[in-house]
Image (spheres, grey):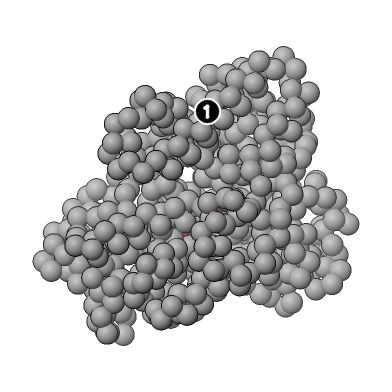
Amino acid sequence: MYYDAIIIGAGMAGLTSAIKLTSEGKKVIVLEKQPVPGGVATSFKRKGFKFESSLHFVDALAPGEEVRDFLDEQGVSRKVEYLELKEFGRVIYPEHDFTVGNDFEALKARLKKDFPHETKGIEAVFSDIARFSGDFDRFMDSKFPLWLKLMLSPIFYSSIIITSCLTAEQLIAKRIKDKKLAAILGTIWGFMGLPPKELSAFYFLIVLRGCWGRKTAYIKGGFNRLFEAIVDKIRERGSEVRFNTRVTQITTDNGERVKGVITENGEEIRGRAVISNANCIDTLSKLIDSPVLRDYYAGKLGPMQKSVSAFTIYLGLDVPAKALGMENSLLSINPTYDHSENYNNSLSSNYGLVSLAVVDHSQLDSGLAPQGKSTICIMTLDNYANWSGLSAQDYEQKKKEACDAILTQLETYLPGITKHIEVMEAATPKTMARYATLPEGAVYGLAQTVEQSGVNRLSQNTRVKGLFICGAWTQPGCGIHGCFVSGIDAADMALKQLKK
Ligand SMILES: Cc1cc2nc3c(=O)[nH]c(=O)nc-3n(C[C@H](O)[C@H](O)[C@H](O)COP(=O)(O)OP(=O)(O)OC[C@H]3O[C@@H](n4cnc5c(N)ncnc54)[C@H](O)[C@@H]3O)c2cc1C
C-alpha cells in the first residue's frame, strides 16, 4: 500500500497533522507504538477512577478559539462534549491566596487591590500583554509568507521581536518592582518547565494569554475522548491508524528524499511524505537511514537544552475533594516567591518544598470518579538524572519518599487528604521517558529558553525532502495548543510538498 503521508506517533501534533491531511483528501497512515492515542496526554483508569496522565488545563477550546474552531470544522466536536471551564484556579503563595479567572480585567483589579503601590506597573504590564496578543494574532492571521512577515516584524509586530529577546523575568521587571507581584505574574512558568529567569518571554506570553486571559473547556469523559474522536474521523475518511506499531527506521533516497518507514516487525510502508511526532532526537539522529544525516543532526541537537521532567501522583479519594477544602478544580501551590528556588527544589528532589499543580478533574466532570469520590492529579517538575541508574529497590524507595514528602506538603492545604486515599499511583521521570519515548523524560521537549524559542526553535522542516517533524520539540512548543499549531504547520508543509 502506498500513502500520501505516513505519520509516526499519535500524540496531539501527529493526530492534528493526520486529520488536517485527510481533510484535504490525502490518504494517510498513523503508526503509534502504544495501544492508545494521545501520547503523554493520554488518560487511564484504575479501580473505577479515571485519571488524566498529564493534562491540567488546556487552552483554546472555547467556542471561537483556534483549536475549537478547527475541531468544529473537522466534525470532531460532534463526537465529544465540551464542559465550559469557568476559571483557571486558585493560586497560593505564602502571603497571597486568590482565584484566577479567565479574563485579565478581574485579575488586574485583584492585583491592584493587593499591590496598590504597583497600580501603574500593573496597568503597563497588562498593556504589554495586550499589545503582544494583538501583534501575535495579526502575525498568525496574516497570509503573507513567513519570510515577509519576519522582515516586516520590526514595523508591524514589534512586540513579538522585543519579547523574543527577553526572559519572562526581564519582561515583567520592566514594569514591576515588587518581587512578590513579579512572582505571582510568573506563576504559570511550571507549564513551560523553566523559571521566569530562564524562560522565553515570547512563549511565556503565548501560554499566559491562553491560560489566564481566555475562556476554555474540558472534555467530558477525559481528553482521551478527544484523541479517540480524531482517530475515528481519520478512519471515517478512509485513512488508517495502527496502534502497537513502532517505527524503527525512516527510509530515504540516500538521505535526499523520504521514501517511507520500516516498522519493528520489518514491514516496509511507502509514502510521499513522512511526518514524525516522535521526539526530534530519535527522529533525526536515530531513525533516518542516512548515517551522514544522523551524524549531522546528532551534532546539531546534542548541545541543545532539554526541558525538565515531571513527577505525578494520581489519587482516587473516597470523598469529594471539595470536602477537604479543594474549592477550585486547580490549585497552584508556590512555597516561595522565588521561582528559581522552587525550580531548584524540583531539580534536587527536595519534594517537601517543590511547587505543585493539583487538579481535581472530577470537579470538572463528576463521571471521572465513583459517586461521592474524587480523582486528583498532583504534579511537580523533576530531574531525570536523579532517577537514572537506581536499583529497582532504590527506585521504589525514592518513589515512596517523593510521594510521602509531597503528600505531607499537601496536607497543609487539603488537611486530611492522606486519610482518604483509596487508589494511588505515581509516575516518575522514568515513566515519562518510557511511555512516550521522551529522552531523559523531557516532558516539554526542548527547553523554552530565549535561544530555543520562537523562530529559533526547531522548525517542522528537515534536510530530507518530504520528511517533517511536529510536536512539543518543534515550533512553537509544548502544550496541547502548541502541539496543535505544530501539527497544522507540519501538515501544511507536507501538502505543499505533495503538490510538487
Ligand atoms: C506531567 C505533564 C503535565 C502537562 N500538563 C499540560 C497541561 O496542563 N496543558 C497542556 O496543554 N499541556 C500539558 N502538558 C504538555 C502536553 O501534554 C504535551 O506538550 C503534548 O501532549 C505533547 O504532544 P506531542 O504532539 O509532542 O506528542 P507526544 O505526547 O510526545 O506523543 C508522541 C507519540 O509518538 C509515539 N512514538 C514515539 N516514537 C515512536 C515510534 N518510533 N513509532 C511509533 N510511535 C512513536 C509515542 O508513543 C507518543 O504516543 C503536560 C505534559 C506533562 C508530561
Q: How crowded is the residue under tag 1: few (<14 C-alpha within 10 Å), some, or many (20+)?
A: some
Across and down, in percent, residue 453 comes to 39, 40
Tell me if residue 326 comes above or below residue 20 in the rendering. Answer: above
Tell me if residue 371 comes above or below residue 466 in the rendering. Answer: below
SS category of the residue bearing label 1: helix
Q: Residue at x 81, y 52 (%)?
A: 326
Rendered image quadrant of residue 22 = bottom left
Q: Of residues 333 and 279, which is closer to you in this image? A: 279
Across and down, in percent, residue 145 comes to 30, 43
Q: Residue at x 27, y 39 (%)?
A: 147
Q: Of residues 290 and 493, which is closer to you in this image? A: 493
In the image as oriented, which residue stretches furthest toward the left? Answer: 254
Residue 277 visible in the shown view: yes
Q: Amino acid at mark 1?
A: Arg
Q: Residue at x 23, y 70 (%)?
A: 272
Residue 279 visible in the shown view: no
Across and down, in percent, residue 289 comes to 19, 68
Tell me if residue 167 comes above or below residue 76 in the rendering. Answer: above
Rendered image quadrant of residue 466 = bottom left
Q: Of residues 316 and 87, which is closer to you in this image? A: 87
Report which residue position mark 1 lands on.
131
In the image as oriented, which residue stretches furthest toward the right? Answer: 323
Screen quadrant of the C terminus? bottom left
Left or right placement of residue 142 versus residue 78 in this view: left
